[in-house]
Amino acid sequence: MKPIPQMEPSYDQAEQEAVQRYLAGGGWLTEFKKTEEFANAIASFTASPCCVITNNGTISLSLALMALNIGPGDEVLVPNLTMIATPNSVKLVGAQPILADIDAKTLCLSLSEAEKKITSKTKAVMYVAFNGRSQNMHEVADFAKKHKLLLIEDAAQALGAHSQGRHIGTFGIIGSFSFSVPKIITTGQGGALVTQERSLYEKIRRLKDFGRTEGGCDIHDTIGYNFKFTDLQAVIGIEQMKKLPQRITRKKEIYRLYQSRLEGIDAVEFIPTNLNEVPPWFIDIYVPDPDRLAATLKEYGIGTRRIYPPIHSQKSYQLEQSFPVTEKYAQRGLWLPSSIKLTDDEINFICDKIARFYKERH
Ligand SMILES: *Cc1c(COP(=O)(O)O)cnc(C)c1O
């Protein structure tokens, strides 16, 4: 068997030809018609009336906060188990991310824990659909409403995921996606914001383009920056979007196959996942000894990755608080090979090695 990476980007002739066609056509490289077309593809896929494409999924979160006037003196509730970009995007606008523990059923923000952290400064809650999973998002929206908080969804890991038949990212006032390399579709770097509110859309569009009243015009009624995308990336994104439906199906198949092959092993825990609504982005398992398992798999050329350490334990945060559920799952979590290119044979090979590891040890 050749080495199996934990993750790798996937693109082919279609992207190559699209880039060549674009370059042959003499485009200006920066965002224009192709970016608009990519935005329309995301809007229609998520059933959102408005979508803005940004340069990445961290800036898109910060832009969402800026558009909602969240900044110094404000607090934003964030789950402790997430990619560091989530709380850092709050720091970028000068607001304070307030970490709350997660719920063991979904590994997403625990609403009861979040509720305990609400103060008079709390303005918003940033809900992360961790690995595409979530609780019933109507309940999350109700929670935000009840406490007069703005709901921002970090849906970076949830393109293609739904709750109650509705796309993740569309329950809050603004939803954010990422197209970084490991995500289900990629443009190298890239992000998107979706919203139902036309006025917010306009505000975000200006914020990311120097506050220009319209593209290419040098009239600036408001302050803005430069968080624009490029058409060169958009042509890749458009091709990736055409592949998304098949990828969603395959991600679900991959998860199902891993689960069916590993569920007999007591040491291996899967998070219950409704595959009708969720295409897990990464295959995440929770085991007592993830580093030893990872080292053994590495001997067979199988790549894995530890899931994120709790945010509060990172040197950049260092909070002396206890978050028992986050700590438990972060200590146990391991991402198995999750590339869309994985074959069933490779998955069987990986599962055999995991089964053997636990048989020999117990
Ligand atoms: C990938 C990711 C981000 C950051 O996106 P970038 O495009 O890499 O900036 C934010 N939040 C979560 C949950 C992510 O997985």
Image (tube, rainbow, N blue to C red):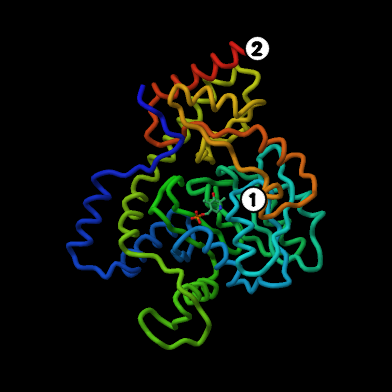
Identify the element where label 2 is drawn.
loop
Q: Are marks 2 and 1 in contact (CB under 8 Å)?
A: no
- Locate the N terminus and report the quarter of the image it occupies: top left
In percent of the image, x 72 and y 52: which residue is there?
318
In percent of the image, x 37 and y 60: which residue is there?
38
Does the beta carbon of the residue at mark 2 sit less than 8 Å from ligand 1? no
Counting from the top left corner in percent of width and height, residue 355 is at 55, 16
Q: Nearer the viewer, mark 2 or mark 1?
A: 2
Label at residue 137: 1
How many numbered tags mark residues here? 2
Whether residue 221 sits left or right of residue 319 in the image: it is left
Whether residue 44 sits left or right of residue 162 in the image: it is left
Q: Which residue is mark 2?
A: 362
> In the rendered structure, which disc, 2 or 1, sits on the residue that comes first in sequence?
1
Counting from the top left corner in percent of width and height, residue 300 is at 45, 22
Does the beta carbon of the residue at mark 1 sit less than 8 Å from ligand 1? no
Label at residue 5: none
Which residue reaches farthest left? Answer: 24
In percent of the image, x 37 and y 34: which residue is there?
341
Q: Tag 1: residue type? A: Met
Counting from the top left corner in percent of width and height, residue 317 is at 69, 54
Q: Residues within 10 Å of mark 1 (few under 14, many from 20)?
A: many
Counting from the top left corner in percent of width and height, residue 117 is at 80, 56
- The image quadrant that residue 243 belongs to is top left
In percent of the image, x 48 and y 80: which residue is there?
211
Vertical placement of residue 128 versus 247, above or below:
below
Q: Tag 2: residue type? A: His
Vertical placement of residue 255 versus 180, above or below:
above
- Locate the C terminus and report the quarter of the image it occupies: top right
In the depicted view, which residue is nearer to us: 198 or 126?
A: 126
